[in-house]
Structure formats: C-alpha cells, structure tokens
Amino acid sequence: MKLYCLHLLVCLIRLAKPDNNSTVQNMPLILNGHYISWPSSKIREKFIYEKKFIPKNIIYTRFQVCSDRVFLAAPRYKRGVPFTLSYTKFTHKEKCYNYVSPFPCIENEDVMIGASDSGSSLINAIDLKMGCDSTLWVLDAGISDTLSDHPTRICEPKIVGFDIFTKKVTHTITLSTLICRAKSRLQYLAVEQVTDSMTVLYVSDGGTRSIIVWYVEKNEGYKIKLPHSIVDGCSENPIEDVFYMMLIEQEAGNYIYFTYLSSQDIFRTRTKDLQKRMNSKCIVNMGKKPCKMVFLGVGYGSVLYFRIKGQNHLYSWDTKQSFLEENFMVVRKSRDCRLITHVDVDSEGVLWVLESNIQDFIIDHVGCYGPSIMLTPVFENPVPVMNDLDDTENFSPSE
C-alpha cells in the first residue's frame, strides 16, 4: 500500500505544475507495464486477446541514460512481454505516468513479441550499455520465459549494437561459439573504448566461470576461463549464482572487477591483461566481502554501487581506495520496500537508481497492477558507513 500511496503523492506534485522547472526535472519517473505507447489501439487489443501482452508480467531491471532519453531493458522472465527494449524521455516527466516506446521501431509483430529468430531481433535483453560512439549495446540471452518451468530457447545468445539516432542495427555478434549451451549463464555486459578505432566488449558467464572478450572492429573474440579460486567459499552452485562484472576506469588504467554473489572475495584484473589472454597471476584479490553484496553498477568512472542482499539501502565504494568497510559510503537510505536493480549517471552528473518490488514480482505477488517501478534521482550527500551505527551493524560476515 505504501508503494501506491507514494505514486499518488508524486502524481499530485506533478499535476500542481510548480513554477520551478527544476522541481519537475528532479522528480522520479513512474513506470508500469500498463503505460506503453502502441503503434495503434488495434494492435494493442490484439496482443491482449492473444495473451502476448500481459502488463503485470513486465518489469524493467536495467537502464542507460543518454541525453534526454532513458533506455530500458525488460527481460522476458514471463510470457506477455511485448518488447524487451524500450525508451522514455525525461521531457515527459510532467505526466503522472511515463509511457515507454519500443526501441527500435516496430516493423512487424514477430520482432515485437520476440518470435522471430532473425539475426538482429531481440529476444530477451538482460543488460545494456551505452558506448562512446552513440551505440547502444544490448546483451540478448536468446531465451524467453526464463522464470517459467519451461523456458523457450528461440536463438543463440548475442550482442546487438544500435545507433540511437538512426535506430538501425550496426552490429550483431553471435556468441554461440563462445558458450556452453548446458552451463552458460550470461549476465553482465561491459563496453571499453580503448581507442577511437578499438572497441572491446566483455560478457560475464557465471555458469562456466568465464569472461568473454570480443573485439568489435576485428569481429573476433575468445573466452577466458577464470581460476577455481574465485568460487572459493561460494554457498551456491556457480551455474545458479549471480556473477557480477563491472568496468572501472582509472587514470592508471581500466580494470574489470568481478565476484559471485555468494563468494567470499572480490577480484579485479586489468583490461589490457584480458586483451592478452591473461593467466591467473594477473588476477588480484581485493579482499573479503563483509556480507553478501549485490552490485548495481558504476558511476563517475571509479565508484562502485551496491546494496546488501535482502536490504534496500544504497552504498558505494570508490575503487581508488582500499576495499575496507571504513571506505564504504551510505549513499541513500531506503524509504520503502523497493529494491534497487541498477544505477547510472546522467549527462549532468546526477545519479539515478532503478528500483522496484522485484522480490514480489518473482513470486507473483504483484496483482493485476504489476510491479511498482520508479527511476529516481539521488541528491543525498554520501556519509561514511562507520559514522552510522545502524549501517555498521548491517555489515555482518557472509554466511
């Protein structure tokens, strides 16, 4: 009930139309599967009738901000997700709800519902990253209805690059030769612009304990098997665990940080070592995690954001400092039961968080309205965890 009361409060503030435009610009975006810009009402009604559009089964989990647009990934966890990649605009925040549009343009119904196995159609967008050259890179699992008892494999996993201005597909990278069909679990994507003529993509494969490295311009890549030591202490089977992978940019060079949710330690390696098909000696153990940390993304080049598993508060760690609790910051304390699933920073340097009651969505406790989703700016000043006794107690040792 608190979630929907908050929605009502935001709507009332927007409808008041304050004179200060910055107030509207700083308001959260309220998202929901019911609020979609369809090509026509006829198509919408047809999809509802055929159960290809079930609003309560739509949830947005990842996003990227580019200028006045926000690109959103809606994984096909359940049936009834009409399209898996969409966008909305910050300029529409004066409305009570924010309507999303499919990206790119819908050309036919097969592409819209992910029924086509054509090379560039998206089946299940699970992560996305904005490149430096206005290319939106999308990681597609190729499998739909992943939370059902019988997931459907429609095509091989791939990475698709879109020009965000022309909405045309610029790259289609099939990953079939770099995965194991029975074990691979692709989860995170990172994009590094090494030079003007060299773009490298990285994909985490938690099921095989690997990182895929792909050179865009050369149209070739390989998979690096990581040492077994990175799963030491894991309380979950790596095939079922979450394998986080994040690109950190520092003056001394760029790094890939990685860890399993249930593992004890966090690691890093230089991207230039990954590009040389590194050996295990290039991996650095950054230290033991004080608890099970859910990593949410990177901001300002070197700041890694996370929350504690099962809790809602947002924390950060500047990777320029040692991996110690005394260097952790409390960025925002949660006001409700939404969980943050992703963070990103806009062109003005404002941190945004995508949050929802995804825990209710997974167990089908959201009702016909569907999950409560908000994209919210963060303006609180971070404070050290060690200065907050409540948060110090939260960092209990991992089980």
Image (cartoon, grey):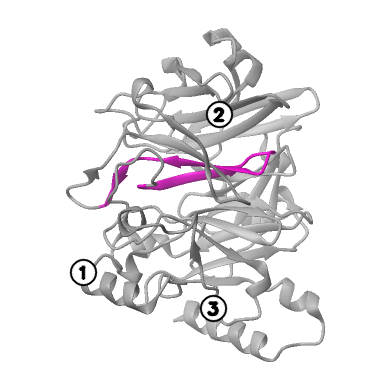
The stretch of residues the image draws in magenta is: 123-147
Residue 201 numbered mark, or none: 2
Task: Identify residue for label 1.
Answer: 50
Residue at the image position 76 percent from the left and 87 percent from the top:
18
Specify whether residue 366 is in view: no
Q: Quadrant of residue 180?
A: top left
Quadrant containing the C terminus is: top left
| Residue 366 inside the magenta-drawn segment | no
Residue at the image position 51 percent from the left and 21 percent from the top:
219
* Of 187 and 285, the residue lying toward us: 187
Sequence-first disc among 2 and 3: 3
Position of residue 345 relative to residue 29, above or below, is above
Cα–Cα span, label 2 and label 3: 35 Å
State the image coordinates of residue 229 (x, y, percent, origin top left): 45, 17
Q: Quadrant of residue 390?
A: bottom right
Task: Identify residue for label 3.
Answer: 97
Left or right for 75, reference 127: left
